[in-house]
Image: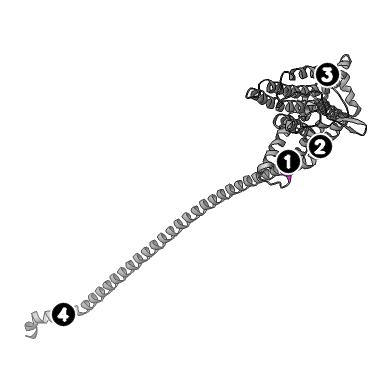
Amino acid sequence: MHHSSLLLESLTRFSSKPLASLEVGKHLYWQMGGLKVHGQVLITSWVVIGLLVIISVLATRNIKRVPTGLQNLMEYALEFVRDLTKNQIGEKEYRPWVPFIGTLFLFIFVSNWSGALFPWKLISLPEGELAAPTNDINTTVALALCTSLAYFYAGFRKKGLGYFRKYIEPTPVLLPIAILEDFTKPLSLSFRLFGNILADELVVAVLVLLVPLIVPLPVMLLGLFTSGIQALVFATLAGAYIHEALEGHGDGEEAH
Amino acid sequence: MFDFDGTLPLMALQFLILVAVMNAVFFKPLTQAIDERDGFVRVNNSEARERLAQAKRLAEQYEQELATTQKQSQSVIAQAQAEAQKIAQDEISQARRQVQSEVMKAQEELESQKQSAFSALESQVDTLARQILEKLLGATLAS
């Protein structure tokens, strides 16, 4: 389909082992109201969403003053994302953004780790293979566009049309760069996540292909680490962009 | 690898729905729980602090009261001692006066008896002198 997948397919031809194979660019296509969608991505994303919602419901079903078990774990997660948001957006305005950034972090984190930990390959599909939802460019671009929407929304709600002042505020000379930033932000967000997760899964797959035992383990551990870091980076940058939109160039300096 | 299609808007939509759902089932209740616990701890803490201050105040008050009571009792003791001493002094002096007056009275009585004895003797002096004279000069007188 693409030259990169052709290269990988030529790699697989060396090995006839059935337990490892590489498939990139193959998708399970579903037709949904005239739109073609990647079924395998949606399936895993539903699993991830279901997992998140079920754990949340279980954790908050019986809230106690002294937390135990699942409630304790989820309170830890909540305080983690709350601190993250507070660090980025600031004490004054972080509260309404905790659900968005927190869900971003949790969704990406659980997606990445599900790709690294859950043996999706055991479930065979007619075409394509199940993997982390975040190794599909559609998912990461969707998340990045949501982030862009979020920071535009934040800016407009705070300052109205005065939000556009930030494009020409220090000097109109930087206007093209300021406009370019709005395109590079989602682009870098989505490609960073997509590239890291896909690359990690490919590295693991290639190593498993070459040496099936022991050797891929350190790379898998590194993959777990990268997955966490990427989720953190995505959420942190989303928070930073929202903070930037809220503060702008003019009045924000003394608030830092 | 970079084939965009319907997955993108669908994913964005379901992510936004996930944000809403997570806000309802996870962020809101747990944030509320954490805030409530914070409030509970803060209230308890301030209450305990207040109670501690009150206890300290009470202890101070008690100590003060104890000190004043001690002072009072000491003064009462001192007063009672002084009173008792005064009473004893009074009684001693009264007894002394009584004794003195009795002594005086006895002396006076003695004096008066002495006086009466003297006067009685003086009244008898004439007859006694005559008797002595008669005894001495009886013969001659008679003769």
Task: Give me the C-alpha separation between circle 4 and circle 3.
Answer: 185 Å
Task: Give me the C-alpha separation between circle 1 and circle 4.
Answer: 152 Å
Q: Nearer the viewer, mark 4 or mark 3?
A: 3
Q: Which residue is mark 4?
A: B128
Q: Amino acid at mark 4?
A: Leu
Q: Tell me if I can see residue B108 in this picture.
A: yes
Crowd rating for badge 4 (residues with CA inside 10 Å; few <14, some 14–19, many 20+)? few
Q: Nearer the viewer, mark 1 or mark 3?
A: 3
Q: Position of residue B20 (x, y in %)?
A: 82, 38
Q: Say whether residue B84 is left or right of residue B134.
A: right
Q: Position of residue B143 (x, y in %)?
A: 6, 85
* Residue A63 within the magenta-colored segment of the rendering: no
Q: Position of residue B76 (x, y in %)?
A: 47, 57
- Chain on which label 4 sits: B
Q: Residue at 37% x, 63% y: name it.
A: B93
Q: Amino acid at mark 2?
A: Leu
Bounds of the magenta segment: A54-60
Q: Are marks 4 and 2 in contact (CB under 8 Å)?
A: no
Work out which residue is located at the far top of the displayed protein and give it. Answer: A173
